Image (cartoon, rainbow, N blue to C red):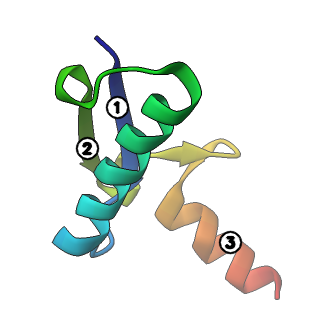
Amino acid sequence: MPYVNIKVTDEGVTTEQKSRLIKGVTDLLFDVLGKDPNLTFVVIDEVPLTDWGVGGLNVAEYRAQRAAEG
């Protein structure tokens, strides 16, 4: 019973995109590992930019810093 947790930043991921991710991951687990799609669980969490860190900064700060650098 596979469980896959996908985390993305909360920047307007559409319902269609989420559906495609769920279907794609489910199909991949079936194709590669033979896992039953009816027993495969996929959860998508949307994380605010300020709650996701990279390079010692939250993503909003990181992107601002990168933009200022040019």
Q: CA distance from mark 3 to mark 2?
A: 26 Å
Say which label, 2 or 1, has the lower sequence index: 1
| Residue under the image location 39 percent in, 20 percent down | 35
Residue type (three-letter) at the residue carrying disc 3: Gln
* Viewer-nearest residue: 32 or 19: 32
Q: Residue under circle 1?
A: 5
* Viewer-nearest residue: 41 or 6: 41
Please identify the quadrant where the N terminus is shown: top left
Q: Residue under circle 2?
A: 45
- Mark 3 element type: helix
> Would residue 40 be found to the left or right of residue 27 on screen?
left
* Viewer-nearest residue: 45 or 23: 23
Locate residue 66: give its quadrant.
Answer: bottom right
| Residue under the image location 65 percent in, 41 percent down | 56
Tell me where residue 10 appears, x and y as whole percent.
29, 63
Whether 38 is drawn above or below 53: the answer is above
Locate residue 26: give its quadrant.
Answer: top left
Say which label, 3 or 2, has the lower sequence index: 2
Q: CA distance from mark 2 to mark 1?
A: 7 Å
Number of other residues with Cα within 10 Å of mark 1, as a class: few under 14, some 14 to 19, many 20 or more: few
Q: CA distance from mark 1 to mark 3?
A: 29 Å
Say which label, 1 or 3, has the lower sequence index: 1
Callout 2–callout 1 Cβ contact below 8 Å = yes
Nearer the observer: mark 1 or 3; the answer is 1
- Mark 2 element type: strand
Nearer the observer: mark 2 or 1; the answer is 1
Tell me where residue 57 appears, x and y as whole percent.
59, 49
- Mark 1 element type: strand
Q: Residue under circle 3?
A: 65
Please identify the quadrant where the C terminus is shown: bottom right
For the question of whether residue 66 can be seen, the reply is yes
